[in-house]
Image (spheres, rainbow, N blue to C red):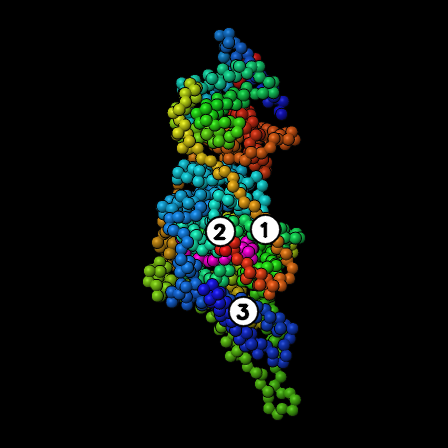
Amino acid sequence: MARFDRLGTHARRVTFATLVIASTVMATLLISAALQEGGISPLEFTLLVLYTVLFAWICASFWMATIGFVLLLFRVRRFDITRRTRLQGATALPGDLSRTAILMPVYNEDPQRVYAGLRAIWESLAATGEGRAFDMFILSDTRDPDIWVEEELRWRELCLATGGGGRIFYRNRPENTGRKAGNIKDFVCRWGARYRYMIVLDADSVMSGDTLVQMVRLMDRDPRVALIQVPPLPVNHESLFARILQFAGSLYGRMYTAGLNFWQAGEGNYWGHNAIIRIEPFAQHCGLPKLPGQEPFGGEILSHDFVEAALLRRAGWKLWLAHDLEGSYEELPPTLIDYAKRDRRWCQGNLQHLRLIVARGLHPVHRVHLAMGVMSYLASPLWAAFLLVTGIEAYVKSRVEPVYFFGQNLFPVWPASYTVQMTTVLAVTLAMLFLPKLYALILLLFDPPRRRQFGGLLHATASVILETLFSTLLAPVLMLFQTKFVFAILMRRAVGWPTQQRGDRATGFIEALQAHGGQTLIGVIAGVLTYLYVPSFFWWFTPVLAGMLLAVPLSMLASRVGAGLATRAQRLFLTPHETGRPPVLERLDELLEGDSRPAMPGTASGDLWQQAIRHPYVHALHRSVLPEVGPLTRRRRHHLDGLLYHLIDDSARDMAVGERRALIANPQHLGESHAAFWAQMPDARGGADPSIA
Amino acid sequence: MDPELAGERAARLHALQRAMGERADGGSIAGWEPIRERLLEYLRLCGIAVGTQAEDLLAIVRQRLRQMLPLRQDDDPVAAAVRELLAVIDAWLAEELAIDPARDRSRLLMARAALLAGGAADDWPAHVAQNLHGRFAARLRAVMVPAVPEQAGLNMPTQDLSLRAPGLIRDRRDLRSRRPSSAD
């Protein structure tokens, strides 16, 4: 049975690879036929190589969508993990779930959003009746002291509001070594043996209780599986940019994930969150080394997820993509600029994988995953190079005078026409880019309930057309962004660990100009040059130019919530989570409408971190959560005393974030600070009348 | 430290010590007043209104301060009073909840947070002042939430990610021979 299964997987991979390679070879042959007249020049050869690589990249995506389309259309479910485990028989009884920890790693995130999400998840889990199998950990790497204290206050509130005391835990690491991967490692090394599985979330993740329970059941049923990834649907933002991306993700995403699952099978990947992981093999095989050399290619592994997946597979474990499980959500960056900032971070992590592709012992499919991750960013500079070389080639061609009479020929020799080949290549390329959108509409046609969730076929079609226009304009902007990022990384300019901007906000003109001004300038220069020197190319080039020239207004318009809501009022870009809000998201909405500040007794004003020194309750809570540390050295004590008097005498305005954090990070000194602050805080002075003496 | 502040602290200390001494003789309590005000403000932040309950609690703090006299020259009387107030509360909590303060400091602090948050009851100062026990334990335990569970960790050894040429065929053979231990 296992051998038969393996053969089936091989057959599917061969099918997929054949489709991609055959299409690429055919397209390359067509274009090379057009280019090779009179021999191939170095420029043409470059063009051919670039085209081949880029076409193969598009092809892989296209065939994944096509396979996914066929599987969904004919409801073929035999390759799904949800179906396979059922076929193979259960090893665990329903209701007998293994102990599972839900992990929420956070780093300077908006606490209100984080805790609203956690509470919605916890309540949804409780509603399943299976909640006792789960504990929850807020694994804070937060450095901002204000956010840190707020996290603690909200953690206690969450425990009391849900009755989750003793099952919902909070800790803040003194040092955030190893970033997110180090944060998870810290959990495994301290509490990993208490649980069989961990479900890793992201700060903006939301998962329904039913989905969490199903994930554990699936793991319980197949002891060879180390990881199941559930694709998250993008939800919740209202800016035009986010709504269009949410629409695209909801409508097309299913096809791509079904197609991806078709060929990756048990060699699936890990996307960093909304996944369940078997802790023991993770501990045994996923301790990440530091890569030799300096950043950006050396040092800590930034995009740890792909590597952890590869290491689990290297140890013989299976990893699956449960593409048909619903109830898994995430939020996208709300604006184009925030999206680009996130890309900048991911870009460095993915390019770091370049050297790991050849790491020893990895499964070939995982090498492909790593290569695809790299290619998702390298494709942009390759596209930019392709456009540049095409322009130069067109210019060179335009300077050559056709010769009709040569040699001993009596009659003119007309230049060979390759219109058919070139038109075919263009049509095929465009079809590969746009056909998946048509597939999605065809799937809606055969699925009336889902069609209604997208606002009906008419509105869905209009949305697809507008989304296509938007993504066409967006493509060159992202291409330039990513090209810049790749070059910046190649120039060894490392990226930090900036917090992601997650809330809706409008992009201002200055911000847009700073981000897109260079792109617009490139558009103007490229437009003028092509119009003057290669006018025939200019008109082909206009879709790319339009994106660059409109980058500033497009970025500003797309960031507007008003524009997003206006399109929603027109029933455009509707998604299932908007038309029929899942209960867990509805609960999240309700919770976000509540208080924006955590509750505490009395009337306390000022920054929350100062309350950890001043406010009796906040102080006690904060100290109770702080890990015990060794005795203070005299030097350290003097330093902290100095900071405290700085706070008391000169206020905290010019104190650095690190200094503020230091003041509330040592339990021993904090206890002393509390009493000293009450004695010496500004409004206490003069309370005792010196004249009494 | 700011010399002005140091002078101010010394003056307050002197006033307090004199007041405590005078009080013992039935005299003025002028040096205690600013400390009392400060402690009342402290309790107000815990949601405790000025009244008999608060005054009873402060009387105990005052008594303890008196026993501490003379204070160290570098100690501030208000700081000492706040410390004593917390010591009174902590001692009561430790007895009420059977917590060993030396061994389980963070649990005691969590209990204090639970008490000061007002989750257990509003009239706790009276119980602390009169050292009454037994009424709050269950309620306090219900609102005390441990930050982390008992440790039970796993080792996470660092993996080898040698960046040498892969030797794909050998790798493939290796991969086939590997099976997860739990599946055996």
Q: Which mark is residue A277?
A: 2
Q: Which mark is residue A55?
A: 3
Which marked residue is nearer to the observer: mark 3 or mark 2?
2
Give the SS element for disc 2. strand
- Where is residue B52 drawn, in percent x and y? 40, 18
Q: Residue at x 49, y 51 (%)?
A: A278
Residue A7 horizontal side relative to residue A445, left or right = right
Location of residue A107 with respect to A13 vertically, above or below: above
Location of residue A644 with respect to A12 vertically, above or below: above
Give the SS element for disc 3. helix
Residue A506, visible in the rendered structure: no
In the rendered structure, which disc, 3 or 2, sits on the residue that comes first in sequence?
A: 3
Name the residue that disc number 1 marks: A288
Task: Please state, as top left, top right, bottom left or bottom right, where the N terminus of chain A lies in the image.
Answer: bottom left
Q: Label 2 is found on which chain of the structure?
A: A
Q: Residue at x 49, y 16 (%)?
A: B62
Location of residue A257 with respect to B5 vertically, above or below: below
Q: Quadrant of residue A349?
A: bottom right
Same chain, labels 3 and 2? yes
Residue A131, visible in the rendered structure: yes
The amino acid pointed to by label 3 is Phe
Which contiguous range is marked in magenta?
A306-327
